[in-house]
Amino acid sequence: MNYHERPTALQEQAYTEARQHFAEHLKQFRANCDAIHNIESNLPATANDASRAALQSSGRVIQTDDGTQWQHAVDLTKISSVCHRHTPSGLEFAVVECLPLKSGEMKDVLNSGHDASKVLQTFARDQRQLLTLWKDDVTAQIREHLEEKYPHQDMNIVVESFDIKLARDISRRETVAQNQSHGVRI
Amino acid sequence: METIPENEIQTAKPPIERLAYSVQEAADMLGVHYFSIYRLIQRGKLKTCRALRGKLLVPRTELLKLLQTDLR
């Protein structure tokens, strides 16, 4: 736990119990932090690969829900990939996400632009914002869980320790990525 | 004539329809991973409200709207 005050035995117990209860959430969160970190670490190489694929005009065709046709270039995650297309104003890159829903697959352009590197940077930044949204929700769920399990007990210190831990997971990886992005050359 | 016991009358009430769901519940209903729900929220495809000190709740109406419009 991360705190300045010394926790009570009950707070220690609550922390351990909550960590077990939310183990899958915490594991998934860390895995997604790592995935974004990997994308940021490999950003120059991925942008190069995307540019190369665009020059060769290779890759399967993906039609997004707005009717636009793209050519697949590089996979980023299981459901998102860098795509490209030729437009009157030049080559355009996009991160396209194919989200499987029960009623069908949703194919959306997350962001696009003429510079593959910038498109990837925007995607990584949006992913980090998504992690913050996730962090706040998981923290609120942990608070709710503890309030139900330990009514009338002060569990703020426990909730804060989770919040700090998750925030550190995001920011630590962000710091590394920012340091690396200074050397990006396409 | 046989009378219905009072406790049985109470259980016969129709279940109250939920107005909103947690992210996990919304994911289960849509058949996707909960991370996808966060994505949909971030992209403005699902509007949410915050309750209980920040916990995200997805209104039932938003889920129905998404199901009706995601196949364009």
Image (cartoon, helix red, strand yellow):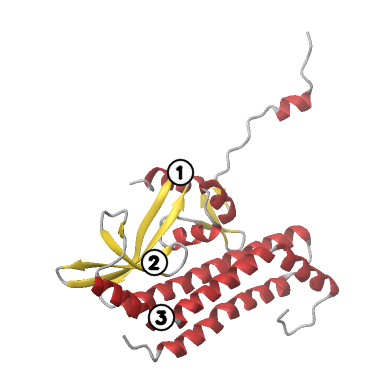
> CB atoms at circles 1 and 2 under 8 Å apart?
no
x%, y% of residue B10? 72, 29
Q: Looking at this view, is A37 or A166 the one in front?
A: A37
**Mark 3 secondary-structure assignment:** helix
Tags 1 and 2 both on a single chain: no
Q: Which mark is residue A81?
A: 2
Q: Give the residue number, with chain letter if any, for mark 1.
A: B64
Q: Looking at this view, is A20 or B43 the one in front?
A: A20
x%, y% of residue A74? 37, 70
Q: Give the residue number, with chain letter if any, for mark 3.
A: A43
x%, y% of residue B51? 58, 58
Give the left or right position of residue B58, taking residue A15 as reference: left
To which quarter of the image does residue A57 belong? bottom left
Q: Is the N terminus of chain A in the top left, top right, bottom left or bottom right quadrant? A: bottom right
Give the left or right position of residue B10, taking residue A141 as reference: right
Residue in the picture at 78% in, 62% down: A152
CA separation in Å, label 3 and label 1:
37 Å
Mark 3 neighbour class, 10 Å CA radius: few under 14, some 14 to 19, many 20 or more: many
Outermost residue on the top side: it is B1
x%, y% of residue B41? 46, 59
CA separation in Å, label 1 and label 2:
28 Å
